[in-house]
Structure formats: C-alpha cells, structure tokens
Amino acid sequence: MAEGELGTRFQRRFLAARQLPSFPWPELEQNLRTSPDSSLLVDILHKHESTAAEPLDELYDMLADILNEEESTRCYKNYLLPTGEPVTLSESVAIISGGTTGLVTWDAALHLAEWAIENSAVFSNRTVLELGSGIGFTGIAICKTCKPKTYIFSDYHHCVLKQLTENICLNGFVLEPGTTQHIQKESQGQEAEATHYQNPKLIVAELDWGSVTEKQLLDLQPDVIIAADVVYDPEIILVLIGMLQKLSTSRADRKPPEVYIAFTIRNPDTYHLFQAELEKAGIRWQITPAHSNTVFLCDMQPNVTILQLFI
Ligand SMILES: C[S@@+](CC[C@H](N)C(=O)[O-])C[C@H]1O[C@@H](n2cnc3c(N)ncnc32)[C@H](O)[C@@H]1O
C-alpha cells in the first residue's frame, strides 16, 4: 500500500475517534520493516497536528486543567468525506445516554452514507425523508455529497432532535423555518453564524412512528425514505412497518417512495422477524448489492446490510 494512502487511513480513524485496534497497524509494521528509512511515521504525526506552528505549552496546560476539572459526556468527531471535506458531529461518549441510543453514530449510518455516496443518483434533486436520524451523520453526508432537493431529518426523542439540530448548524447548514420551532430557537445563535451555502432545503421534523397520522405525513411528500439502525428491537419493528404503510399512500400522485433501510444484524431472530412482518404487511424486499468503497468504516462489515423495500 502506498505510504500516502496508509497515512490517510490513520488520519481518518484518528479524526473519527475510532478504536485503536481498528487502525492499520499490521500494514504500518510491514511498511517500516520493508523500508525502515521511510518518512511514514513523520507523515502520520504531521497529519495528527492540525498546524505547522509550535503548539503553546500554556495551551496544553489549560487543556489539561479543563480535562481534569470534569469528565465530559460529549466529544467531537470528524468523518472525512471522499472530497476531504469533514462532517463534524458532537456526539455522546456513551453508546446509551439520556435513555436513548440516538446520541452516537452507529455503523449502519456510516455504511448507508458510503452506499449513498456511490449511488448519489438515488438522492440527487429528490425529496429525502430519513427516519430515526439520530444526531445526523447520514443526512449531513448526503446533503454535502448527493445534492438532494429537500432533506427531511426526523426523530422523536427530544435530546436527539436538539443535538441533531446543533450538528446540522455546526456543518454550515441553515434549517428551513417552521419545522420543530421550539428546537430551532435553542440553537439560533449558531444558526446566525452558519454559512448559508447549501442548495438543499433542510428540515428537522419531530416524527414518532407510533403516533404519526397520515395527515401529518401528507406535508412531507418524500421520493426516497432512508433509515439506519432502526431495526434493533421486536417492539420497534411493528410501529416502523406501520409508519411505512402510512407513507406508501402519503404522496399526492400515489407513487410510492423508494425505501432503503440499513442495519446491523446483531440478533438473527430480530432480522428474521423483520422480514416475516414485512411479508405479513405485503411489503417485498431485496438486499442491495454491496458497495465497493469503505470510506468511513475500517473494513467491510459482514453483518451490516441494506434492504430496499417496495412499499
Ligand atoms: C440506534 S439509533 C440510530 C441513529 C442513527 N440513524 C444512526 O444509525 O446512527 C435509533 C434511532 O431511532 C429513533 N427512534 C426509535 N424509535 C422511534 C420512533 N418510534 N419514532 C421515531 N424515532 C424513533 C431513536 O430516537 C434513535 O435516534
């Protein structure tokens, strides 16, 4: 593997705060054994320093004081898109916090974004509705790379919606006024600073699959519906399928939207239950062919898959 490419792989994992075992250590060892004079280590160290200037000792001291003061429950992660542009997210450090799994980015979200980038025509100039968006990785990556006409992020958990809204603004996007107004107010300061450069119209909607009405869905008119890691619990499966059935007739032209659901198969029983319930509801499905690039994930994850549903 070329030295530059190996350096970049280290950089991507470092910026996204991936776990150390996922770094390409064997390739680094191999490289250092075959060319001990290589500048690779220097390159990796440079990639981890954001500036060529000497860091001030005082800054490090202040940082150490802050870190010692209290343990933070949040961190910032940067995911580099193929263009080199980052998606920056404020995430929880715990996988479950505030009673929700929605405050971290799950592998299925990374997988779905990789697939979307390779299949951008599915999203280009269309209205996309994302269910259970969590803190927004997939949607922000799609808005930065796939040129949707409108992107509707949605979730039902208050803390998740607040964090999602902050992350959208953190990435330079401005939300359309009128949706989830109580949430937008809280982050108005950041919105004012955000650069208004995007084409897609961005909306954050408070949508609970269990209680949403067909009338509420009529406003959305999605061409494409996506979701990542929303099939993890038998209870959730029925309300999710009920929601998809309502969405199948929600367009004025009665043309059903295209649906893509990405998930990690943790428990094969849950996966089979989802398929059985889809069949009961008369929803056909097929597994989408695997994409070839692993931009955000370290390697192809054999237990992460995307189903296309025909609602
Ligand atoms: C495991 S997280 C996945 C978040 C994100 N899509 C990802 O993959 O990183 C599941 C998300 O589904 C949302 N969710 C669960 N049940 C829901 C419901 N009934 N209505 C709307 N959203 C729901 C949760 O709030 C949470 O954000």
Image (cartoon, grey):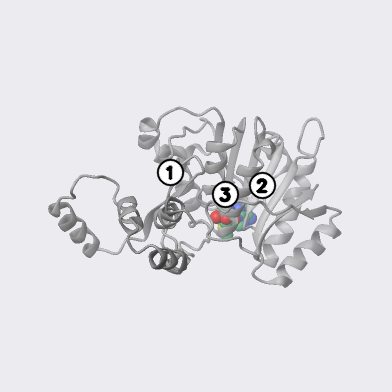
Can you say whether 140 is above or below 238 in the image? above
Q: Find out if the beta carbon at label 1 lies less than 8 Å from the nearest ligand 1 atom.
A: no
Image quadrant of ligand 1?
Answer: bottom right
* Residue 194 x %, y %: 39, 32
Q: Distance between the residues labelled 2 and 3?
A: 9 Å
* Residue 154 x %, y %: 59, 45
Q: Earlier in the sequence, mark 1 or mark 3?
A: 3
Q: Which mark is residue 166?
A: 1
For marks 2 and 1, give the one nearer the viewer.
2
Q: Which of marks 2 and 1 is nearer the N terminus?
A: 1
What amino acid type is highlighted by mark number 3? Ser
Question: Does dot 3 land on a helix, a strand or a loop?
Answer: loop
Residue 45 appears in the figure: yes
* Residue 47 x %, y %: 34, 51
User: What residue sits 41% from the left and 29% below the top?
Assistant: 195
Q: Which mark is residue 133?
A: 3
Can you say whether 204 is above or below 231 in the image? above
Q: How far apart are marks 2 and 1 (CA)?
A: 21 Å
Q: Find out if the beta carbon at label 3 lies less than 8 Å from the nearest ligand 1 atom.
A: yes
* Residue 252 x %, y %: 78, 31
What amino acid type is highlighted by mark number 2? Ile
